[in-house]
Amino acid sequence: MFELERHKPERGIVVIFGASGDLTRRKLAPALYNLARQNLLPDGTVVVGYGRTEMTDEVFRNRLGESVSTFSRTQPIESDIWNALARRMFYQRGSYDGGDAYPALHRRLLELDERFGTGGNRIFYLAVPPGVVPAILRNLSSVGSLERRRRCDEGTCYLRVVFEKPFGHDLESARRLSNEIDRLLEEPQIFRMDHYLGKETVQNISVLRFANSIFEHVWHSASVRYVRVTVAETLGVEGRGGYFDSTGILRDILQNHVLQLLTLVTMEPPASLSADAIRDEKAKVLRCLRPLEGEEVVRSVARGQYGRGVVDGVEVPAYREEEGVDPNSATETFVGLRTYIDNWRWAGVPVYLCAGKRLAQALTEVSIEFKEAPRVLFGAMEGVELKPNRLTLRIQPDEGVSLRFASKVPGLKMELRDVEMDFPYGSAFPAASPEAYERLLLDVMGGNSALFARRDEVELAWQFATSILEGWQKRPPPEFPNYAPGTWGPVSAERFFAEGASYADAGDR
Ligand SMILES: NC(=O)c1ccc[n+]([C@@H]2O[C@H](COP(=O)([O-])OP(=O)(O)OC[C@H]3O[C@@H](n4cnc5c(N)ncnc54)[C@H](OP(=O)(O)O)[C@@H]3O)[C@@H](O)[C@H]2O)c1
C-alpha cells in the first residue's frame, strides 16, 4: 500500500545480534533467502551474525541453511540461490557487554565493506532478549559504530537499527529506553518491529478503506455500532513460560499488535502515504483512546488465566503447570476490554479489544458491526430476527474479508437468514503472500518506516496499557484459573462482549 512512497533497498551489511537464536532461525534467515529468491535482496548484501555461541562462518552458514530448509515458506530450497547468499554470511563471536569483541566486530565490518563494496551501510538487527539491548547500543556507540550521521569516503551511507518487541515493559521503561536510543540515533534510523504491520492482510486494511469509495461513507459513529479487534490463540505458552510469566498477554499482545490494528482501522485518512503522515494519524487515535483507570478497570476490563482442560481430546496443563511458570502465578493469559475513541468520528462507539491464549479458535480479526436496520418492514415481521450487518477483516489464519447481511431464503414463505459475502485472500490471489519479515526487512533496507511504530505511538500505547496494569496492581487478582482451555475466556468477559455479540459468533460460551 505504501509502494508510491517506498525507497529502493540498498546493499549494506546486516548485523544480527543474537544470531544463534530462535528469531534468526525461524524468521530472519528464511526471509533473507526468500528475498534473494525473488531477486529483491540488493545485490551484494552481506550478513554478519553476532553472539556468544562459539561458531565458525562455516557452521553458521550450515545452521542457517538447515533453518531455511525447515522454515522457508517456499520449498524446495534452490541451492544455487542459497549458496550465493551463504557465501556472503559471516559470524563474529563475542559477548554483549564489552571487552575486545566490539572493536573486533567494527574492524571486521570495515574489512567486509572493502571486500564487498557495502559502502559503510549498516543495519544492526537486535534479535536478542530486551535486557541485552542497552549494553549492545552502548558498546556499538563506544567503538564508533553508531555515529548519527556516519561519514563515509563515498559520501553518505546509512545506519539503521532494528528493535524487536517488547519495546519496554511499561510506560516508564519504554521512555527510558527511548531516551537512551535518542541520545545515539535519529528517529528515521530507528525501526521498532511489530511484525503484524508486515502482514499482507494488515496492509490491506488501508487499501480497503482508502482505495474504495463505499466504506468510508459508513466508517463512523453514525453507522457503526462497535469496533472489535481480536487476537485469539489456541496454543498455550509453548515453552516460553519463563518469558510470558513476567509479561502477560496485555503487554505481549494487546499493547502492540491489538492497538496497532485498531489504529489502522480507525485512523483518519493520512495526508499522504509517507511514513510520518500515516504515523501521525495512528498516533492521533491513541491520543484519543479513553484511558481505563481506577474503577473503570474493574468495570471495563476482564482478565483471565486458563486452567487445566481437554482440547480436541488432548489433556492440556493449566497455565500454572506450564514449565517456567510460577505455580501461584497471577499473570493473565486473557484480557478483554471495552473502551472508546473520544474523537469526532468515533464518539460513543464501543471499542472491544481482546487477546488470549488457549481460546476456542485461533484467529486474528477486526470486526466492524453496523447499526441495525430500522425495525419496520422486514424487521417488524413476526419471527424475524435481523442481525446487524458486520464487516470482518480476517488477518489470520483464514485471510480475507467478509460482510454479513440478511437475505431471503428461497421459497414461497418470506423467511430471512444471514449470509456472508466473502473475499478469501488465498483463492482470489493464488500467488503465496510473502512473510511479514520479508516485507519488513526490505523496508529497513530501503529506509521505509511506514510499517514500523514511531516513539510517540509506542509510548501512547504503553500509557493506555500501563494504567490498566496499575489498576490491576491495586486489587487482588481474580480467582485464577478462571477459564477452561478451548473456550472464549472467563465468564467475566461476557459482561461487555455480550453487548457486542460473542467474538466469532461461535456460540462456545
Ligand atoms: N522468536 C520469535 O519468533 C520472535 C517473534 C517476535 C519477537 N521476538 C523478539 O526477538 C528477540 C529475539 O528473540 P529470540 O526468540 O531469537 O530470542 P532467543 O532465542 O531467546 O535469544 C536470541 C539469542 O540472544 C542471545 N542472548 C543474549 N542474552 C541472552 C539471555 N539472557 N538469554 C537468552 N539468550 C540470550 C543468545 O545467543 P548467544 O548465547 O549466542 O549470545 C540467543 O541465542 C526477542 O526480543 C523476542 O522477544 C521473537
Image: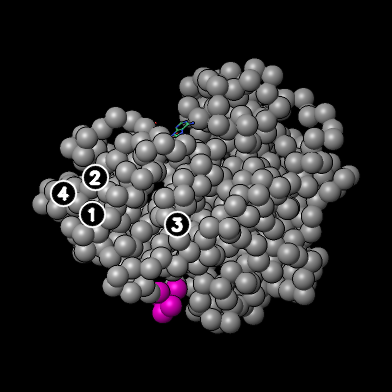
- Identify the disc placed on residue 87: 4
Q: CA distance from mark 4 to mark 3?
A: 26 Å
Q: Nearer the viewer, mark 3 or mark 2?
A: 3
Tell me the element at label 4. loop
Identity of the residue drawn at 61% across and 49% down: 177
Q: Which residues are magenta?
A: 2-6
Q: Can the viewer see residue 390?
A: no
Within 8 Å: ligand 1 and the Cβ of disc 3? no
Q: Are marks 1 and 2 in contact (CB under 8 Å)?
A: yes
Q: What's the residue type where badge 4 is placed? A: Arg
Q: CA distance from mark 3 to mark 2?
A: 20 Å
- Identify the disc placed on residue 90: 2
Q: CA distance from mark 4 to mark 2?
A: 8 Å
User: Between disc 1 and disc 2, whose residue precedes?
Assistant: 2
Tell me the element at label 2. strand
- Identify the disc placed on residue 112: 1
Q: Can the viewer see residue 482?
A: yes
User: Between disc 1 and disc 4, whose residue precedes?
Assistant: 4
Q: CA distance from mark 1 to mark 3?
A: 17 Å
